[in-house]
Amino acid sequence: AAAAACLEIMEATLRWSHLAPTAPDTLACYPFYDEDPFVLREAPDVYFAACEGAAGVASRLVRGPAGQTVRTVALPPFARTGRAALVDLGSLEVTELCFSAGL
């Protein structure tokens, strides 16, 4: 559920073309007066975000504001899960990697 919510939020920020729509009001950041550094001028090919409550890697293909394809990837905390993602930049396919010490 946490990963699905992260992916929904990521898709919304792509639609809005803004990575932190509530900053600096509810998100601590330096207030910029001349330009907003969180505005997306163009959609990325891959959009990663940390997702604290996720148990594993989750991803989804979405359409950017101008119809471009964007792969969104929600990542769980590596220190807790040992999970990471490998993205093929040609196909935008995601492979989940799981690291373990075997303990």
Image (cartoon, grey):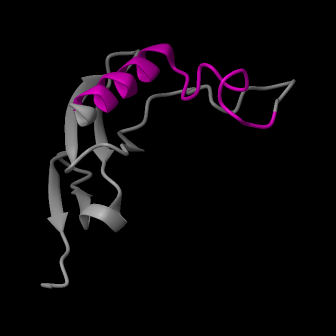
Horizontally, residue 24 falls left or right of residue 45, namely right
Quarter of the C terminus within the rendering: bottom left
Q: Position of residue 44 (x, y in %)?
A: 42, 36
* Res 80 quadrant in image: bottom left
Horizontally, residue 13 falls left or right of residue 92, namely right
Q: Position of residue 41 (x, y in %)?
A: 57, 26
Count of marks overlaid on the render: 0
For the residue pair 89 and 30, the one nearer the viewer reads as 30
Range of magenta residues: 4-30
For the residue pair 72 and 83, the one nearer the viewer reads as 83
| Residue at 66% in and 24% down | 26
Q: Position of residue 76 (x, y in %)?
A: 30, 51
Whether the magenta-drawn stretch holds residue 102 is answered as: no
| Residue at 73% in and 36% down | 29
| Residue at 36% in and 43% down | 51
* Res 8 quadrant in image: top left
Horizontally, residue 30 falls left or right of residue 46, namely right
* Residue farthest toward the right in the current orientation of the protein: 33
Q: Position of residue 65 (x, y in %)?
A: 41, 15
For the residue pair 72 and 99, the one nearer the viewer reads as 99
| Residue at 54% in and 29% down | 19
Whether the magenta-drawn stretch holds residue 6 is answered as: yes
Quarter of the N terminus within the rendering: top left
Residue 75's place in the image compared with 11, above or below, is below
For the residue pair 90 and 50, the one nearer the viewer reads as 50
* Res 83 quadrant in image: bottom left
